Amino acid sequence: MLWAIVGAASLVGLSLQVSRIYNKYKSLSRTIPTVRRVYGDREAQYEDFNSLVYTNAVVHEVLRLFPPLVGIPKYCVREQTLCGGKYVVPANTYLTLNAAGVHYNTDVWGPDAAEFNPSRFDPRENKLVKGSYIPFSEGARSCLGNKFANVEMVATLSNVLRRYTIHFSEGYDEARMKRELSESHSVITLQPKTPTPVIVKRRN
């Protein structure tokens, strides 16, 4: 079941990435020289993962805007106090972490929290606030498939982009994309309500 969910999250994440990055495609295209330099003529290897900094940042930013699990279930074994004692959570309480609420928090991510900006996850420019990014939860009870899903998405996205260009189908524009993505709904994991029509062409 775990790997089914991880696989679903990966596929959903990729579909949302492809949809979301259209309006930033020129920005994303700057990753292509790096991808080609890292891969050369060979297939992707696990060791390449950390070298693809911007592609990693794109994956993280999409998962921030569209977390696979909007609500993450938790169980409080012992009584806990939060926010310096302001809130008390009794023992044996079921909780749900609001991943979307955390990821769109303007106090953490700034006034442009709802905008697509992969540079938030560039370690050379920014440092994440602990607990501010939880697409796979966080800590000892976080999703075991976290690393697997991230590596899979980075490898697939980078391989697709180095070989193909992707554009909206005729008559489909950014405004429609944003409207339809805003209607994404949860079926175990977050999913787009409708498919995004695209044209994929092999690069010369």
Image: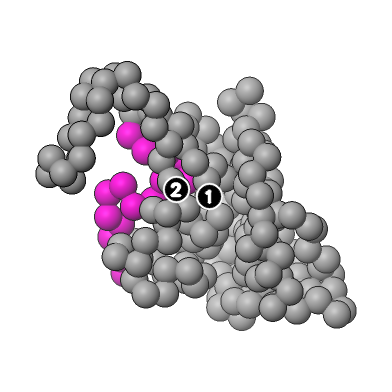
Position of residue 111 relative to residue 185, above or below, is below
Tell whether 106 sits left or right of 136: left
Q: Mark 1: which amino acid?
A: Pro
Q: Is residue 55 magenta?
A: no
- Residue that appears at 21% across and 24% down: 79
Disc marking residue 99: 2
Residue situated in front as seen by the camera: 123 or 174 = 174
Q: Which residue is mark 1?
A: 67
Q: Is residue 131 magenta?
A: yes
| Label 2 with label 1: CB-CB less than 8 Å | yes
Secondary structure, magenta segment, majority class? loop
- Residue that appears at 81% across and 68% down: 198
Label 1 SS: loop
Position of residue 169 relative to residue 156, above or below, is below
- Residue that appears at 54% across and 37% down: 148
Query: Which one is earlier in the sequence, the residue at label 2 or at label 1?
Result: 1
| Residue mark closest to the camera, 2 vs 1 | 2
Quadrant of the drawing holding the N terminus: top right
The image quadrant that residue 5 belongs to is: top right
Count of number-bearing discs: 2
- What span is in magenta? 125-139
The image quadrant that residue 187 belongs to is: top right
- C-alpha separation, residue under disc 2 versus residue under disc 1: 7 Å
